[in-house]
Image (cartoon, rainbow, N blue to C red):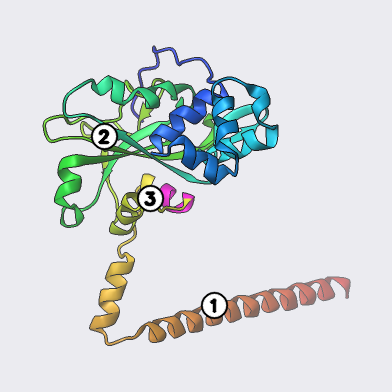
Amino acid sequence: MASASQTHSTPAPLNAQTLVGLLSRLMNMDMHAVAQVAGVPKKNMLAWIAGKRQALRLRSVVAILHTVGIRIESLRSVLDPERVHFWDVRVPLFGSVRQAFMPLTALSKMLALGVITEVRPARRQWKIVDRLFRRYFMVSRSGGSGVEFQVVVCVHTHPLRRARVTPEVVKGALWRDDSDSHCITVSGEAWHAITAHDMTVQEYRRAFESVQGQFDWADVTLMAREFGMTAEDVAQWMMRESGESQATAESEGQRYNVTFLLSHGQEAA
């Protein structure tokens, strides 16, 4: 794994109101939407954002934090490890790139020791609009480095401004590898899930670790059509195979039990 800009000091922890402001911006949610999803009166939430802590009960604050992807663990705020967080950064054609990345940089403390890589699909699945105007990055932390998280950042940019997420943007983060491109190719399935903002944690992990099988579902569908098989044929075959595997496992278990009993019977005799 590549070394990071570890000489940078990470920002101080952020309070709950600041976190909500930063994350709602990255999620393209205005305060009205956050309040509505959290089930909190907008007027009360805005008063809380402005610093009046008594405007909301603790239960309401937790609901707001959950809406923007924050979980409270051991009296500290962490990114919910049980979901994939989808964020957007919009780089203007003219203006400061650094300012566009400000919300992401401000969250560096929360993303410290995360690992960054750009992702793209096979060329045949890469639409021209994504190639020219969007770049997708995964920022992930797993294992013993702290609370796990999974983030996908879509950078909306322009052909003349090829901005990207780097350890300079997320202070204390690392590149995933030592390649010059810092980019991995993901399967068509994973690419669709990333661009559709609809991905499970398991799918994210497989894509991030580049664990790709020889076939994806599109390949299987095409093969089924070529062999003249219907969806029902495939489903029945899967159930039949699953049943045979289960029966084999049960048979092996019974055989082991018989052998075990016989061996112990001989010892007793």
Q: Amino acid at mark 1?
A: Ser
Report the residue that reaches farthest toward the right: 269
Camera-side residue of 169 and 38: 38
**Disc 2 from disc 1: Cα separation:** 42 Å
Q: Position of residue 218 (x, y in %)?
A: 29, 68
Question: Crowdedness of circle 1 by 10 Å Cα count: few (<14), some, many (20+)?
Answer: few
- Tell me which label, 2 or 1, sits earlier in the chain: 2
From which residue to which does the magenta span run? 201-205
**Disc 3 from disc 1: Cα separation:** 35 Å
Q: Which mark is residue 197?
A: 3
Which type of secondary structure does the marked residue at label 3 adopt? loop
Camera-side residue of 3 and 120: 120
> Which residue is labeled 2 in the image?
182
Which type of secondary structure does the marked residue at label 2 adopt? loop
**Disc 3 from disc 2: Cα separation:** 22 Å
Place residue 71 in its image quadrant.
Answer: top right
